[in-house]
Image (cartoon, grey):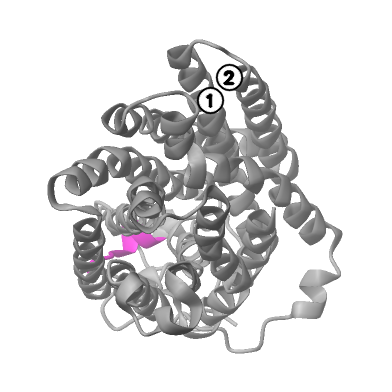
Amino acid sequence: MSSLPSSHSPAPGADARGLRPTHMRWVMVGMLTIITALTYVDRLNLSIAGEYIQTEFHLSTHTMGWILGAFVLGYALFQVPGGWAGDRFGPRSILTFAIVWWSIFTALTAVAPELPLRAWLGVAGSFIVVRFLIGIGEAAAFPNSNKTIAYWLGENARGVGNSIFLAGIGVGGTATPIVIAWIMQTWGWRTSFYVCAVLGFLVAIVWRSIATNRPEDHPRVNAAELALIHPKTEKEPPGPRRDGAASVGVPWKRLISRRSTWCLMLSYFCEGYPNYIFFTWFFIYLVQERGFTIKQGGIWGAVPYLAVVVLAPLGGWLSDRAIRKFGKRRGRQSAVWLGMTLSALLLTTGAHTANNVTAVLLMAGALGFNMFATPSWWAASIDLSPNYSGSLSAMMNTCGNLG
């Protein structure tokens, strides 16, 4: 079923000759980058605060591991519901709701030790519940960002589009150790969670004001830009309805029965585990095992994310270039093979390097090349199922986080 043009914008097939294309698609990608950065600020802030929280409440490293892991559990379990909701109702509304949800519970992290939950579950249990609920909210972020890329970028730009919003991981990861550590040292660890929550509410307002589900619905997208997003050489644009929602249910049986779906999910399972070395433990590792001070840990803890800012867009660009030369299957695979091989070698070498600075630089390269490969997985989920990329990428990301 063909998509219907909005009353504001000409149809993709309209004559775009003589028009300079608008650039709203890149504004949308930029917003997704900001949202991704926010998710990682809210994800990593507890790993920075963990040093203070462990000391204040006399929590063991094992208990702290459960608190940090609670986010991952909620995040993994609610990937598919979040992705399905994006396919059903459109990513604009779902992302708005998700940002508000996780921002509320980010603020509640600051008062978790005083919540009524403490009477039943103790301090650690209260933290675990709150972090689990943050994970539920953030679970919708990546599948719906990927769904937005499916609508707003053509098939030859999806690697780049995914890599730009994934570079938000690097932006958030770079800022968090430095800024959050400074806020905690200046005003205490609780203030950092309030600041993160306020940022979240502001981002939700801006996203809701700017975004539409599809470019055809946006008043600031002209026919020339639509022709770039959906060129005549491309198959029918993804998404059967103007409002961005699927007109029929997600074909779960067909998705699950495909060999490519299982290969996508199982390979992403292997990709996910090494990331959480950096996302949850790296700051604590630098302070407790490598002997860095809190301030030094904040600075050096940002280095892996600087590598992500550089290498994630490079990987997405290479992935899109490779599919033009080798086709979609081999093109996406080649970027993954290169990135993950280099990541494994650098991580192994860095972990066994005695010099602290050299070790951090090697491990930073490991995360960078992991994220070099990652856009190809997300772009492949759109290639395989454009209309249901939210649900498919959610299944894939569930496996990544279970890893």
**Label 1 sits on what residue type?**
Met
Residue placed most toward the observer, 175 or 111:
111
Toward the left, the furthest residue is 186
Toward the front, the furthest residue is 58
On-image quarter of the N terminus: bottom right
Magenta stretch bounds: 220-226
The picture places residue 154, in percent across and down from the top left corner, at 50, 55
How far apart are labels 2 and 1 at the CA level? Answer: 5 Å
Image vertical order of residue 90 relative to residue 42, above or below: below
Q: Which mark is residue 363?
A: 1
Image vertical order of residue 386 relative to residue 313, above or below: below
Residue at 74%, 38% (x, y): give it. Answer: 330
Can the viewer see residue 128?
yes
**Label 2 sits on what residue type?**
Gly
**Mark 1 or mark 2, which is nearer the start of the sequence?**
2
The picture places residue 212, in percent across and down from the top left corner, at 33, 74
Q: Mark 2 points at which residue?
A: 350
The picture places residue 258, in percent across and down from the top left corner, at 84, 65
**Element carrying mark 1:** helix
